[in-house]
Image (cartoon, grey):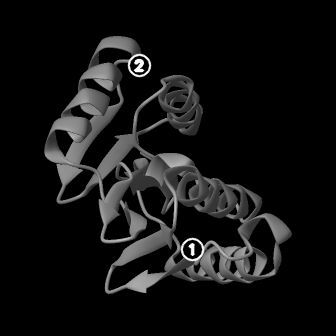
Amino acid sequence: MAADSSFDVVSKVDRQEVDNALNQAAKEVSQRFDFKNTDAKIAWSGENIEMEAVSEDRVRAVLDVFQTKLLRRGVSLKALDAGEPRQSGKLWKITATTQQGITQENAKKISKLIRDEAAKGVKAQIQGDELRITSKSRDDLQAVQKLITAQDYDFAVQFVNYR
């Protein structure tokens, strides 16, 4: 009998792509005319991304530039968790973080979807912040991938370790 085929459902962000997008956004913010004299900047602050400018609409524009750069580099905006603009002295700031891993409750949502909608031989197993999907049929696994991508979850989903 043939061995089971499997793949993992993960939610990971390539830190290098985020860093490249941030550097591109910082360069554009420093050079664009509409950001002149607004003290607008974007930079890493530990694991967070800090954006600041002199007004609320300018700091939102910095966030918009950063999101555009992320999309161009193939990073899903669902992986970016940007807070609301807040005033800090004379400057307005937005703090953003990147989400890594699938939470237990999100993994349970996907697992329930697979139990309810997928073929009988497909099994889902939660492994930390990943979800392993196994089946004897590769066609069933591809159907599960289509099923998961058709759902509009509020977190980014990728498929890895397909074997």
Q: Which of labels 2 and 1 is toward the front?
A: 1
Measured from the top left, where is residue 151 in percent x and y?
48, 23
Measured from the top left, where is residue 80 in percent x and y?
45, 55
The label number, if any, that marks residue 118 in the structure image: 2
Q: Tell whether 18 sits left or right of 161.
A: right
Query: Image point 57% across, 74% down: which residue?
Result: 18
Query: Image point 65% across, 62% down: which residue?
Result: 70
- Mark earlier in primary sequence (2, 1): 1
Q: Give 71 or 87, whichever is nearer the viewer.
A: 87
Circle 2 residues within 10 Å: few <14, some 14–19, many ≥20: some
Q: Quadrant of residue 105?
A: top left
Residue 157 visible? The answer is no
Q: Is residue 137 above or below residue 143?
A: below
Q: Tell whether 157 sits left or right of 58.
A: left
Query: Image point 66% across, 84% down: which residue?
Result: 23
The residue that disc 1 covers is 18
Give the amino acid at mark 1.
Val
Q: Tell whether 59 sits left or right of 45.
A: right
Measured from the top left, where is residue 60 in percent x and y?
55, 52
Element type at mark 2: loop
